[in-house]
């Protein structure tokens, strides 16, 4: 588990959206440099759950991480 802000984001991405660590790092870098990143494509109910999980993770870690879902 990483303790830097970037590490917290990567850990959250890798945990909530089962993805290899290297992919989580790339998603985090896209968010950092481009303002957004795609963590996955899911059916609506699963996407809503993932958004809640990210927001809970951010709150628990006192981190200003944001997550939204968009139609494909």
Image (cartoon, rainbow, N blue to C red):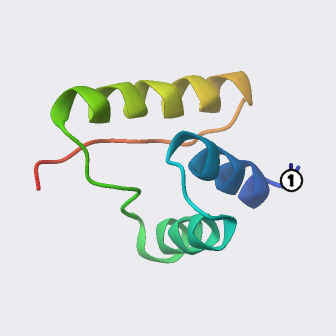
- Is 71 left or right of 38, judged from the image as shown? left
| Image coordinates for residue 3, horizontal then vertical, percent | 88, 49
Residue at 22 percent of width and 26 percent of height: 45
Question: Which quadrant, please, contains the C terminus?
Answer: bottom left
| Image coordinates for residue 40, horizontal then vertical, percent | 35, 55
Up the image or down, 32 lies above or below 6; here it is below
The residue to which callout 1 is attached is: 2
Residue at 51 percent of width and 67 percent of height: 27
Up the image or down, 13 lies above or below 61; here it is below
Up the image or down, 37 lies above or below 29; here it is above
| Image coordinates for residue 26, horizontal then vertical, percent | 56, 75
Residue at 70 percent of width and 22 percent of height: 60
| Mark 1 surroundings: few (<14), some (14-19) or many (≥20) residues within 10 A | few
| Image coordinates for residue 63, horizontal then vertical, percent | 68, 37
Residue at 77 percent of width and 57 percent of height: 7
- Is 49 left or right of 18, judged from the image as shown? left
**Quadrant of res 25:** bottom right
């Amino acid at each position: 588990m990483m303790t830097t802000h970037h590490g917290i984001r990567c850990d959250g991405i890798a945990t909530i959206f089962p993805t290899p660590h290297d992919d989580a790092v790339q998603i985090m870098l896209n968010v950092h440099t481009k303002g957004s990143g795609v963590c996955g494509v899911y059916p609506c109910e699963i996407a809503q759950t993932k958004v809640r999980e990210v927001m809970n993770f951010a709150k628990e870690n006192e981190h200003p991480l944001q997550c939204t879902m968009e139609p494909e």
